[in-house]
Amino acid sequence: MTSITISAIRPRTSILDKSLSKGKGEVSLSCYALLFSELVQYCQNRVYTVPELQNKLAEMGTEVGHRITDLLIVREKSGKREIKLLNALLFIKSTLWKCLFGREADKLEHANDDERTYYIIEKEALVNKFVSVPKDKGSLNCASFVAGIVEAVLCDFGFPAKVTAHWHKGTTYMVKFDDAVVARDKQLEDR
Amino acid sequence: MTIHNLYIFSRNGTLLYYSEWNRLNKSGITMEEEAKLMYGMLFSIKSFVSKISPLDPKEGFLYYKTSKYTLHYLETPSGLKFVLNTDNGAQNIRGLLQQLYSQVYLEYVVKNPLCQLNEPIQSELFKQKVDALIKHSQYF
Amino acid sequence: MIVLSSTWRDSKRHLFKFSQEMSRAGSRLDSKKVNSELFTLTYGALVAQLLKDYENIDDVNKQLERMGYNMGIRLIEDFLARTGSGRCYDFRDTAEKIQTGFKIFLGITPTITNWSTAGDEFSLCFESNPLTEFVELPDHCLNLKYCNILTGVLRGACEMVQMEVASWFVQDQLKNDSVTELRVKFIKRLEDAIPAGED
């Protein structure tokens, strides 16, 4: 009888055998800044316009976001996700931010004229710390990458939203939820 | 005390940055020629210093002094060259040169992805930070 | 792009105001440090993107090396400024400085082993490595040198201090070896640039 090969590598210890890291490891800021700068330059060489570049950065942020959701839910929430919109946002402002950037985001605000829209505000975004945007790319905000992370986390929590990064009070992430999300949250509140 | 001017050269001799504060006499040649002369002089003096040195020269050439001014020199192991001319009152200015390297060049050129390392430095922010560091130093 | 009119600004209300103390208590990282998981996942996203963009895995390996080189020529300045170290006395000295560099930048200390008899080659062995924390290589990526960015960093950093080195992986934990071993070889000393018109 021949055995059926499923994977070419037969791991001695699988990644699942290792216990999950506590997330206390650190690398130097300059190292991260330079890696991020390579990532930005790579994306820049593959697009023509600033919005395209931002989309590409957001896309890559999304990849990070999906993975960080899994990690945080298992590690910080013992496998449970937030089901209230406000709690989900607070989770992002505090838990996610602390995990990624070592501190909470500066502010979380609700737009009064649009109940679907929230703002997460950060005075000095880590990814923008060393970037000085040239004049011909005025509106470029590399924090689009972080916006991608936030968007992925919210979507994975079951709160589909569009998240974009803007230059305002430092960096502001505009979170626009789908209508259905807001409607559902209201129903929850009514009960 | 007075600081006259500053040159920063890349490892292959490109003048990356020049700035002056109290420089009354001009050399009378173009900046390009002056930079070339300066770099050539540094190159020669360095090789002379290490050739003539009775012991392993380690850091090698540090400064020279004339009756009117002192030229201070710092070369990093990566070949960056910082040259600062001051009057003779300012001695032991090496710390300031180190600061220029680690607090200004490193933060605002090396970590700025938009600054190429071998080209003249255009960043406004860098210019401001150099100016601030020099003007606030005790030697200025 | 959003345009923030003053009415917009005035109309929004503050939902949550956390006191200064709370946000300060929330900060645990040194401002010069970054959580290694962010680093791990960002690098992972980059490698994943390269795999999508290039058809050939060898090209991905090359691109990672190039990116590493660009990082290396800048990281070395940070290293020199922080440590104040001078030129290396010999290649053993270099090995130790590279080890220190890993400690400073990635927070890990690879062991230096397997010196060649001529003293021009050594290995860096990694027990753990923040680049590969959550990584498993899928079968179609067996040729991928996941950490190849490191070889570029070494090449770039050493070149800036007048040394040409080559490095390559001889063992890789992602390919089921017990350690990850990076071999580093001294090629030659690079000479100072001679100014135009001098001999």
Image: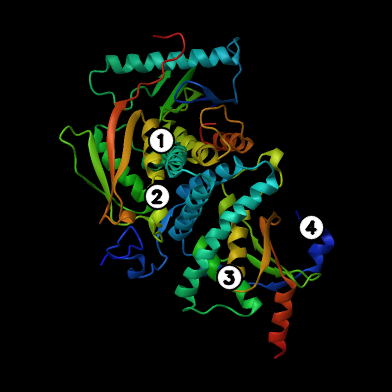
Where does label 1 land, which residue? C156
Give the total of numbered labels. Answer: 4
Foreground disc of the pair 2, 4: 2
Q: Secondary structure at mark 2?
A: loop
Screen quadrant of the C terminus of chain B: top right
Which residue is under mark 3? Answer: A156
Q: Residue furthest front?
A: A1
Closer to the camera in the image, C193 or A115:
A115
Note whether residue B77 is visible: no
Give the x, y percent position of residue A162: 68, 63
**Label 4 sits on residue:** C4
Indicate the secondary structure of the residue bearing disc 4: loop
Dot 3 amino acid type: Asp
Query: Is any part of residue C145 visible from this angle?
Result: yes
**Marks 3 and 2, how far apart at CA:** 27 Å
Q: Position of residue B101 (x, y in %)?
A: 47, 35
Q: Are marks 4 and 1 in contact (CB under 8 Å)?
A: no
Rendered residue at 58%/30% (across/down): B121
The single residue placed furthest to the right in the displayed view is C7
Chain on which label 3 sits? A
In the rendered view, does C118 fall on the left or right side of B92? left
